[in-house]
Image (spheres, rainbow, N blue to C red):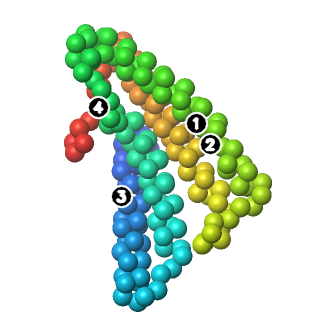
Amino acid sequence: MKRFLDRLNRDAERWLLLVLYSFIVYVIFIEVVRRFVLLYSSVWGEETARYAFIYLVWIGAASAVRDRAHIRIDVLLHYLPPRGGAIVYLIGDLLTAVLVCLAIYWSLDPVLVSIKFGNVTDGLRIVRAWFLIAVPLGFTVVMVRLVQSILRDLGDLRAGRPVFTGRRLFD
């Protein structure tokens, strides 16, 4: 079971990103063929691709937090001792956690309003809250990854190991 959870922790976002990205490419390809060959376009195709892209962005953000792959200016970290670099990373993660908490709080309001009034999507005619929940859900996964990052950095700091600086794009 532990092995499964480790694998899920390591690869869950990658597989979800692959599935969502493949879905978007497939749907957009089909819609282009339908529009220019069959002279007909569906409403659901563009809408599902748009909402899948929203989920893709939030899952990608969580993956980037896990791998420390977000864009950052780290030239100052090269001049700091390893312990100082670890403290800068910790401060950055804590500030990001505060921002994420605020974002979760503020992004729940549109979801609750959508549920309260039964708002539906334009083309699919399903409850819009299923798609609006992507933002607070995405920020929640980002928060989980931030907590993991903070715990990893604290462990590295206590053990005297160099802090995890991130993975390269294609590692």
Q: Earlier in the sequence, mark 4 or mark 1?
A: 1
The residues tagged by marks 2 and 1 sit, at their Cα atoms, a distance apart of 6 Å
Amino acid carrying mark 3 in the image = Leu
**Residue 61 versus residue 160 in the image, above or below:** below
Q: Is residue 161 visible?
A: no
Amino acid carrying mark 4 in the image = Gly
What secondary structure is marked by label 2? helix
**Residue 29 versus residue 95 in the image, above or below:** below
- Residue 18: mark: 3
The residues tagged by marks 4 and 1 sit, at their Cα atoms, a distance apart of 24 Å
The residues tagged by marks 2 and 3 sit, at their Cα atoms, a distance apart of 26 Å
- Residue 103: mark: 1
Amino acid carrying mark 1 in the image = Ala
Q: Is residue 76 visible?
A: yes
Near mark 2 (Cα within 10 A), the count class, few <14, some 14-19 or many ≥20, is some
What secondary structure is marked by label 4? loop
The residues tagged by marks 3 and 1 sit, at their Cα atoms, a distance apart of 26 Å
Q: Position of residue 19 (x, y in %)?
A: 39, 61
Q: Position of residue 69 (x, y in %)?
A: 32, 37
Q: In the rendered structure, are the residues bearing label 2 and label 1 in contact, judged by CB atoms less than 8 Å apart?
A: yes
Q: Residue at x 53, y 29 (%)?
A: 99
Quarter of the image where one finds residue 7: top left
Q: Earlier in the sequence, mark 4 or mark 2?
A: 2
The residues tagged by marks 4 and 2 sit, at their Cα atoms, a distance apart of 28 Å
- Residue 48: mark: none
What secondary structure is marked by label 3? helix
Q: Which residue is mark 2?
A: 107
